[in-house]
Every structure is written in structure tokens, then in C-alpha cells.
Image (spheres, grey):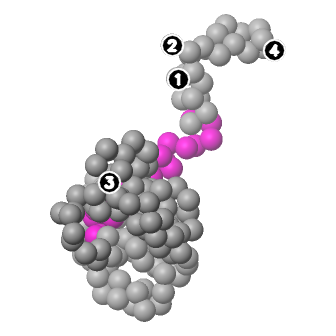
């Protein structure tokens, strides 16, 4: 157990879990943490296509506020709002359940790369991947860098494509 001592106040050491609990309570963070847990199931609830163009902002007075990438999508989602509500309530376990949806136009943030994907990309390459010739590796990296700006994502995609190339039977054309 980690203890924090505040020598300025002359108090006894306090477990960090107690201090964090007080911080969460003092700054009223509990509701935000609960809301974020509910939003973690967003893509699974509505599907990847809708999740790419629409993201939850917050829940206020049983209304789910959503940010949508374009007015065309906003119009389409308006007609799907009952299904979105049903799926979100079922997946998130929202109590009380969300009963309304409010759409707002905005820029949709790129989804975060999962820690599992980062870890998989950082694993050492198996020996059979070294069989891919250096020119092919260089071309592959150049193709990826031409379209992807995030260096971490470049490495993840590069490692995945290398594994794919190494798994192909000898002589199979690159698609």
C-alpha cells in the first residue's frame, strides 16, 4: 500500500486510495467516470460505421448529446434515434435510461489506438518475417507513411502488413 505524508499539515500518512476517493468526491468526478464507462460501449452498441461519424458528448437530464460529422448524417441519424437509444441503453446499462437524443454538428475525434494493438505492434517480428526482402519492406513503409501521419499508427500498420506478407505463399503477387 502506498502512503502519502503531508508534512506541512503534520498529519499521519494516508493511503493513496483514500486521497483519490476524496479528490473524486471533492471535484464531483464520479458522474463523469460513470458516464465515460457508459460511452466505452458506444461503438459496440451502434456499430462501427455510425461510431465513425457520431460520438457521444454527455448525458444531461436523460438526454444523450451526440456530436455528428455532417448535416447529412445528422438527418439520417434522426430517423435512427429510437434504435440508437434502445441499443445504447441495452449496452451501457444506463440508469435511468436515456430517453432523448440531441444532435450537434462537430469534428469527430480519431478513435484511440488500443493498448493491445500497440503491444502487438511492438512485439519482435518472427524469424519468417525477415524473409521479406528489404526493397518490399521499404516500399511498404513508404506507402503507409504517404497516407498515415501518426508515427505510432504507422508502426502498427507496418507490423501487421509485414506479418501478412510473410504469411503468403511464395510467389503470390502483392495485392
Give the distance between the C-alpha atoms of the residues marked 2 and 1, in whole angstroms: 9 Å
Give the residue at mark 2.
1
Give the distance between the C-alpha atoms of the residues marked 2 and 3, in whole angstroms: 49 Å
- Please report the residue visible at 34 percent of the width from the left and 58 percent of the height from the top: 132
Comparing labels 4 and 2, the label whose residue is closer to the camera: 2
- Residue 140: image quadrant is bottom left
Q: Is residue 9 visible?
A: yes
- Residue furthest to the right in view is 8
Q: Looking at the picture, how far across and down is residue 5, in whole percent?
A: 69, 13
Closer to the camera in the image, 82 or 5: 5
The answer to whether marks 2 and 1 mark residues whose Cβ atoms lie closer than 8 Å is yes
Give the residue at mark 3.
131
User: Which of the two labelled residues, at mark 4 and mark 2, occupies the earlier sequence position?
Assistant: 2
The answer to whether marks 3 and 4 mark residues whose Cβ atoms lie closer than 8 Å is no
Can you tell which mark lies on residue 8?
Answer: 4
Whether the magenta-drawn stretch holds residue 55 is answered as no
Give the distance between the C-alpha atoms of the residues marked 3 and 4, in whole angstroms: 62 Å
Q: Is residue 115 visible?
A: no
Q: Main secondary structure of the magenta part?
A: helix
Comparing labels 2 and 3, the label whose residue is closer to the camera: 3
In the image, the segment drawn in magenta is 25-47
Closer to the camera in the image, 51 or 93: 51
- Please report the residue visible at 78 percent of the width from the left and 11 percent of the height from the top: 7
What count of labels does the image hold? 4
- Please report the residue visible at 46 percent of the width from the left and 70 percent of the height from the top: 139
User: Which of the two labelled residues, at mark 2 and mark 3, occupies the earlier sequence position?
Assistant: 2
Note whether 129 is above or below 100 in the view shown: above
Circle 4 — which element? loop
Q: Looking at the picture, how far across and down is residue 99, in whole percent?
A: 33, 69
Whether the magenta-drawn stretch holds residue 28 is answered as yes
User: Which of the two labelled residues, at mark 3 and mark 1, occupies the earlier sequence position?
Assistant: 1
Give the residue at mark 1.
17
Amino acid at each position: 500500500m502506498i502512503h502519502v505524508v503531508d508534512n506541512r499539515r503534520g498529519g499521519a500518512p494516508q493511503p493513496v486510495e483514500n486521497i483519490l476517493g476524496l479528490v473524486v468526491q471533492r471535484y464531483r468526478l464520479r458522474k463523469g467516470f460513470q458516464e465515460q464507462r457508459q460511452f466505452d460501449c458506444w461503438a459496440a452498441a451502434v456499430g462501427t460505421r455510425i461510431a465513425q461519424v457520431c460520438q457521444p458528448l454527455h448525458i444531461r437530464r436523460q438526454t444523450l448529446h451526440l456530436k455528428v460529422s455532417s448535416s447529412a448524417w445528422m438527418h439520417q441519424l434522426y430517423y435512427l434515434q429510437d434504435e440508437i437509444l434502445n441499443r445504447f441503453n441495452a449496452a451501457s446499462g444506463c440508469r435511468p435510461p436515456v430517453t432523448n437524443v440531441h444532435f450537434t454538428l462537430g469534428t469527430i475525434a480519431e478513435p484511440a489506438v488500443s493498448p493491445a494493438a500497440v503491444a502487438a505492434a511492438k512485439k519482435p517480428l518472427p524469424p519468417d518475417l525477415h524473409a521479406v526482402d528489404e526493397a518490399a519492406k521499404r516500399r511498404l513503409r513508404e506507402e503507409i507513411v504517404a497516407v498515415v501521419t501518426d508515427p505510432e499508427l504507422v508502426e502498427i500498420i507496418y507490423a501487421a502488413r509485414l506479418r501478412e506478407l510473410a504469411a503468403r505463399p511464395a510467389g503470390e503477387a502483392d495485392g
